[in-house]
Image (spheres, rainbow, N blue to C red):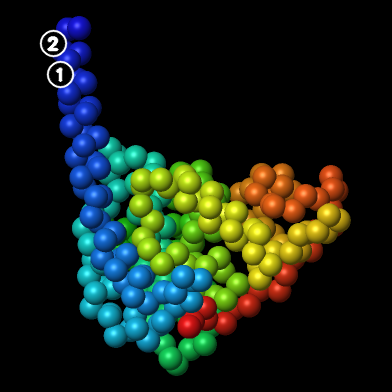
Amino acid sequence: MSKLLSCLLVLCALVRLNAQTATANLHSDWTALLQKHVSNNGKVDYAGFKNDKSKLDAYIGKLRENMPQTAWTREQKIAYWVNLYNAFTIQKVSEKYPAINSIMELDGGKFWTTAKINLGGKDYTPDAIEKDILIKELKEPRVHFALNCAAASCPPLMNKAWEDRDLNNTLETRTREFLNNKNYNVITFTELRLSKIFEWYAGDFTNVISFVRKYSKTAFNLSPTIKYMEYDWKLNKK
C-alpha cells in the first residue's frame, strides 16, 4: 500500500472520528429535559418546559452552534434535524402555555410555514425541516413518526433524544408502535382506518397500502377500504 493511500485512509478515519465526537454529547441536555417533562407514553408537561425555558433555549442555542457538517453521517443529520424540530416546537408552544390549548392557535394555524429558526444566517421553518431536509434530501419517510407537532393525534413524543446510534432500529420501532396503536390507526382484514398523516403525506410513502402492510401486526386483504381518522389538535399535554 502506498504512503499516499495510507495517509488518505488515516485522514478519512480521523474525519469520521471527529464527526462522531462532534455529536457524541450534543443531545444529552435534550434527553435530560425530555426525561423530566415527557411521560413514557409521550404526554408533555408544557408548564415544566416553560419553567426550564433557559435550559431549553440553551439546548437550541447549542444546535445553532453545531450545525450538520459534510462529514456527518446520514444518521447524525437525521437525529439533529428531528431533535431540532421537536425542541423548537416545544419551545414555541411552551412560551404561550397555558394561554393556548392547541398549536393551531399559533400563527393563525400556520406555525409550520411561518415560524422560523435562524441557523447559520438562514431561516428554517418546521415545514422546510420536515419536507426539504428530512424527506427530500435525507429521504427518510419514517420521520413522520419521529416528529411531534404538539397535538394529541401526533405520533407520541419520545422521552429521550434521537441519536445516530441505532437510529434505524428506533425508527422501525416507533413506526411499528404508532401504526399498531388503536388510538391512531385501526386495522381490520377489510378496512384501514388510518391517521391523517397517511393522507397528508401519501406521496412520501410511495404506496400507503404497501407501507402499512410492512408494519401492521394485523393482516388485511389486497384491496382494503381506506378511511382517515379525525385529527385531534388539542395539546398532547399531561
Residue 90 visible in the current orientation = yes
Mark 1 packing: few (<14 Cα in 10 Å), some, or many (20+)? few
| Location of mark 2 (residue) | 3
Kindly state the secondary structure of the residue where label 2 is placed.
helix
Rendered residue at 25%/56% (across/down): 26
Q: Is residue 193 above or below residue 219?
A: below
Closest to the observer: 135 or 162?
162
Q: Is residue 149 above or below residue 174?
A: below
Q: Secondary structure at mark 1?
A: helix
The quadrant of the picture occupied by the N terminus is: top left
Q: Is residue 231 left or right of residue 77?
A: right
**Image position of 214 (left or right of 26):** right
Q: Is residue 207 visible?
A: no
Residue beneath disc 1: 7
Q: Residue at x 19, y 20 (%)?
A: 8
Number of marks in picture: 2
**Amino acid under disc 1:** Cys
Left or right of 35? Residue 9 is left
Determine the image quadrant of residue 70.
top left
Q: Position of residue 13 (x, y in %)?
A: 21, 29
Left or right? Give the position of 212 relative to 139: right
CA–CA distance in space, label 1 to label 2: 6 Å
Q: Quadrant of residue 39?
A: bottom left
Percent of width and height locating residue 200: 65, 60
Disc 1 and disc 2 in contact, CB within 8 angstroms: yes
Spot occupied by residue 131 in the image (x, y as percentages of width and height): 51, 54
Q: What amino acid type is highlighted by mark number 2?
A: Lys
Which residue sits at x=21%, y=37%? 17
Instruction: Report the residue that reaches farthest toward the top.
Output: 1
The residue at 31%/66% (across/down) is: 30
Which quadrant of the structure image shows residue 232?
A: bottom right
**Front position in the image: 127 or 205:** 205
